[in-house]
Image (spheres, rainbow, N blue to C red):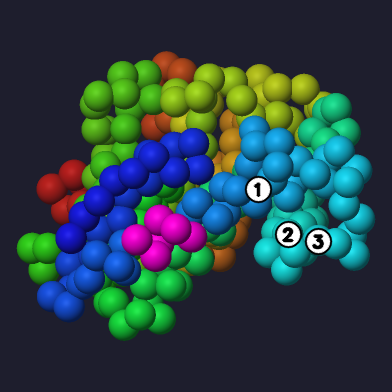
Amino acid sequence: MKETRHSMGMPATVEIVDVSVKQESLDTAFDFFTSVDERFSTYKPDSEISRINRGELTQADYSREMREIFALAEETKRQTNGYFDIATPNGSIDPSGIVKGWAIQKAADILRSSGYENFYVEIAGDIQTAGKNSDAQEWRIGIRNPLAHDEIVKVVCPQGRGIATSGTAARGAHIYDPIAKKPVETTVASLTVIGPNVYEADRFATAAFAMGEQGISFIGSLEGFEGYQIDQSGTAVKTLGFTHYEYESDR
């Protein structure tokens, strides 16, 4: 059973291939995404994060989920030497760089707790898989060419791990360099990261892209992470272990 809905301002897809799948399980996952959007969207004036940014809530008023995201963001900032920061140039807080991967991972946890073993959860290209696909094979994920979006340049099998891509192809130059305190200026067009889960892959992909050309080296230095970087000329660079996840016919 597979369904795609517009959620959190982006296309979201949930596919469950276990024979016992029920519609209510998909509904539960999408309802969770809706609740995340209502709490963390900086575009919704009544969201918790918008109220925090307006000074209407103190730390004592923060929800458990907000406290968790703030703590994870601070941890990521420390682990990336400041290249990940949810504080924006105008002094407000925007946690979107960490919330998407976190939400996908939480949805996957919800499906696992419901007894499902074979599924796929995606929001705008960031993906968590589990088990096998409907053909009883490893899930295969295509990496798009950031210079020609309808072209797949690489196919990978995450093998139950998470995959996330950061870049400018879909949304333009939207990533901020918190060290230089200006939008990222780089020859890198996209950076795809495979990590222990989609939350881990997403947060480090965002930080690594902010590092520019050195981002792929940063990913390569992390234990349990692999990356595939494409620059504006179409040249690709990958970490040493990335080949392990490449679909055989694509090697």
Q: Which residues are magenta?
A: 27-32
Q: Secondary structure at mark 2?
A: helix
Please tell me in which quadrant of the rendered image residue 76 appears.
bottom right
Give the residue pinned by disc 3. Answer: 62
Camera-nearest residue between 196 and 27: 27
Residue drawn at point x = 31 percent, y = 82 percent: 115
> Quarter of the image containing the N terminus?
bottom left
* Residue ID at (34%, 44%): 5
Residue 173 image offset from top left, x and y in percent: 59, 21
Q: Position of 185 compared to 180: left or right?
A: left
- The circle on residue 229 is none
Residue under label 1: 40
Q: Position of residue 13 (x, y in %)?
A: 32, 49
Q: How many marks?
A: 3
Q: Is residue 133 left or right of residue 26?
A: left
Amino acid tagged 2: Met
Residue 242 position within the rendered picture, expressed as x and y whole percent measured from the top left? 38, 53
Bin the neighbour count of mark 3 within 10 Å (Cα to Cα): few under 14, some 14-19, many 20 and up: some
Distance between mark 2 and mark 1 Cα atoms: 8 Å
Q: Residue at x 73, y 50 (%)?
A: 48
* Magenta-drawn stretch, dominant element (helix, strand or loop): helix
**Element on which disc 3 rests:** loop
Q: Looking at the image, can residue 250 be seen?
A: yes
Q: Residue at x 51, y 31 (%)?
A: 167
| For the residues bearing labels 2 and 3, Cβ distance under 8 angstroms | yes
- Relative to 9, residue 20 above or below: below
> Any mark on residue 66, and which?
2
Is there a contact, CB below 8 Å, between mark 2 and mark 1? yes
Examine the structure image and report whether residue 57 is included in the region drawn in magenta.
no
